[in-house]
């Protein structure tokens, strides 16, 4: 009678190299995502400095009106001419009249453009307007 010897059962091992690869991939993924999420409000602008700036707290995200240095305006990151601001603000305000508007203006924007944007918002019945600034210590 033929008799074959069975090999001893192999002990289970945890392979750590693939786990390290997955953890490094996750780390890189979250770092790249966090770098893209930081400018979450409108377009990137060089905000004016303020020593008394306070963080606006509200559950719903506001509608961001960004005044750019070249004279254009962006409503929630959609660029347009300042003359088209009233129509875009009216459409956004009709969707949700309780939404707050944040005006984010570059430091180099002329004061008249800020006043024009504020007049266009107020002409549409928007009373809740906040100005974005950068807090300095």
Image (cartoon, helix red, strand yellow):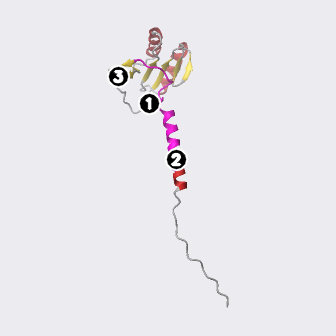
Neighbour class for label 3 at 10 Å: few (<14), some, many (≥20)?
Answer: few
- Cα–Cα gap, marks 1 and 3: 18 Å
Between 36 and 113, the one nearer to me in the picture = 36
Dot 2 falls on a residue whose secondary structure is: helix
The magenta-colored residue range is 22-48
Q: CA distance from mark 1 to mark 2?
A: 33 Å
- Indicate the secondary structure of the residue bearing disc 1: loop
Whole-percent x, y for residue 30 in the image? 50, 41
Mark 1 or 3, nearer chain start:
3
- For label 1, the residue is 61
Residue 79 image-quadrant placement: top right
Q: Are marks 2 and 3 in contact (CB under 8 Å)?
A: no
Q: Is residue 64 visible?
A: yes
Residue nearest the observer in this picture, 67 or 27? 27
Measuring from the top left, give residue 57's x and y in whole percent: 36, 30
Location of mark 3 (residue): 53
Mark linked to residue 90: none
Image quarter of residue 97? top left
Above or below residue 55? Residue 84 is above
- Point out the image quarter for the N terminus: bottom right
- As drawn, is 1 to the left or to the right of 47? right
77 left or right of 97? right
Per the model, the C-alpha gap separating discs 2 and 3 is 38 Å
Against 27, residue 57 (above or below) is above
Q: Are marks 1 and 3 in contact (CB under 8 Å)?
A: no
Quickly name the residue at label 2: 24
Q: Who comes first in sequence, dot 2 or dot 3?
A: 2
Q: Mark 2 Cα within 10 Å, few/some/many (few <14, many 20+)?
A: few
Quarter of the picture holding the C terminus: top left
Residue under the point 52% across and 20% down: 74
């Amino acid at each position: 009678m033929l008799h074959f010897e069975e090999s001893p059962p192999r002990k289970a091992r945890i392979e750590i190299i693939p786990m390290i690869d997955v953890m490094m991939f996750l780390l890189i993924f979250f770092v790249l995502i966090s770098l893209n999420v930081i400018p979450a409000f409108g377009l990137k602008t060089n905000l004016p400095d303020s020593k008394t700036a306070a963080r606006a707290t509200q559950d719903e995200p506001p509608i961001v009106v960004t005044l750019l240095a070249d004279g254009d305006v962006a409503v929630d990151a959609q660029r347009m001419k300042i003359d088209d601001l009233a129509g875009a603000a009216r459409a956004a305000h009709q969707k949700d009249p309780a939404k707050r508007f944040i005006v984010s203006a570059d430091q180099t924007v002329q004061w008249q453009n800020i006043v024009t944007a504020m007049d266009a918002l107020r002409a549409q019945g928007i009373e809740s307007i906040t100005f974005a600034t950068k807090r300095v210590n």
